[in-house]
Image (cartoon, rainbow, N blue to C red):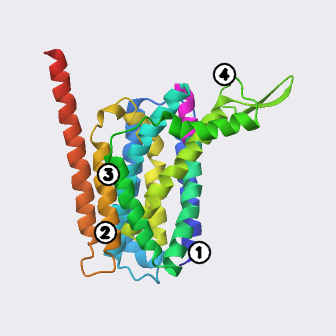
Amino acid sequence: MHISTYVYFGLLTLAMLLLDVWQTRNGNITIKKAAIWSLFWVALALLFFVSLYELWNVFEPDSTYSAHDAATAFLTGYLLEKSLSVDNLFVFALIFGRFAVPHELRPRVLLWGVIGALILRAVMIAIGAELLHTFHWVLYLFAFFLIWTGYQLSKPEKEEEEEVSSFPERLVRKLFRVTDNYQGTKLFTRDNLGFMVTPLLVVVAVIAMTDVMFALDSIPAIFAVTQEPFLVLTANVFALLGLRSLYFVLEGMIDKFVYLRPALAFIMTFIGVKMLLIDTEWAIPTMVSLSVLLTTMTVAVIASIIKEKNAAKKQQA
């Protein structure tokens, strides 16, 4: 591991984050603008994918991966994290509705969420990589956890509103006085009785707790694709950086992806099985994982579109 590689990539991540902040600075994000920036972030990830073929020996000269293996692992990990992030958007939409977050404040809340997720996942990747290096059997715990997660996703959806909001909301309200209304982008304020927090801080706390829940699923999943920490980190960063723009593209269509949950259930189970088979003669190649991932998400999206069209025709009939 070359520390300088992580330092340079950290600086690149900071620059990309500042760019994302700049392009949403007025809080007014149209679907067209969000779609353009979503494509930009995807293009940036694909550019990094291509660069791995040319610069892998510069990034990680001591790695046992070939440039082709590294690039394939990154792309598979990126698409996996991107797929899981779409499921995250359902919960974000639920949180925004639950707390009646004004539309112009949502980019700021998502920004705090992305920053929190980047920090949290960097820490979890470092811990996970060290655990796998020192205690290889942890790999199998990750595998069973992913299979269990896939099983949970395959069950009928429960009412998630209280699950995602109650604990952090209760904690903040227990520790602080909370204003009745939002006060722009302020997290803290004062009145004649002293220090207070705004509902925006409650929402940020809920988003932070949600990030913890998401990371517990996504980090073990990507370690099944690759155990190279640099690739795990970069795949997560590029998937998270486009999350804000993607939310505003899908905001009005989120409830139409009816087959996303079953698709993710299958993917998580498949990734869990892949992890169990890593050290056996039946190990699943990364290219096969990439094909399964792409096929599953494509089928889920097409099936969702067809079902939505059929439902619309029945309403018109």
Q: How many marks?
A: 4
Q: Which tag, 3 or 1, sits closer to the chain's start?
A: 1
Q: Which residue is mark 4?
A: 181
Residue 75 location, x and y as percent?
Answer: 34, 62
Q: Secondary structure at mark 2?
A: helix
Which of labels 4 and 2 is toward the front?
2
Q: Is residue 35 magenta?
A: no
Q: Mark 4: few, some, or many residues within 10 Å (few <14, many ≥20)? A: few
Residue 3: assigned label: 1
- Toward the viewer: 1 or 189? 189
Q: In the picture provided, is 285 more to the left or to the right than 242?
A: left
Question: Mark 2 near mark 3, Cβ–Cβ under 8 Å?
Answer: no
Q: Which tag, 4 or 2, sits closer to the chain's start?
A: 4
Q: Which residue is mark 3?
A: 265
Quadrant assignment, res 194? top right
Q: Amino acid at mark 3?
A: Ala
- Toward the viewer: 184 or 88? 88
Quadrant assignment, res 251? top left
Which of labels 4 and 1 is toward the front?
4
Question: Mark 3 near mark 1, Cβ–Cβ under 8 Å?
Answer: no
Q: Amino acid at mark 4?
A: Asn
Q: Which tag, 4 or 1, sits closer to the chain's start?
A: 1
Q: Is residue 108 magenta?
A: yes
Residue at x-position 59% and y-position 43%: 112
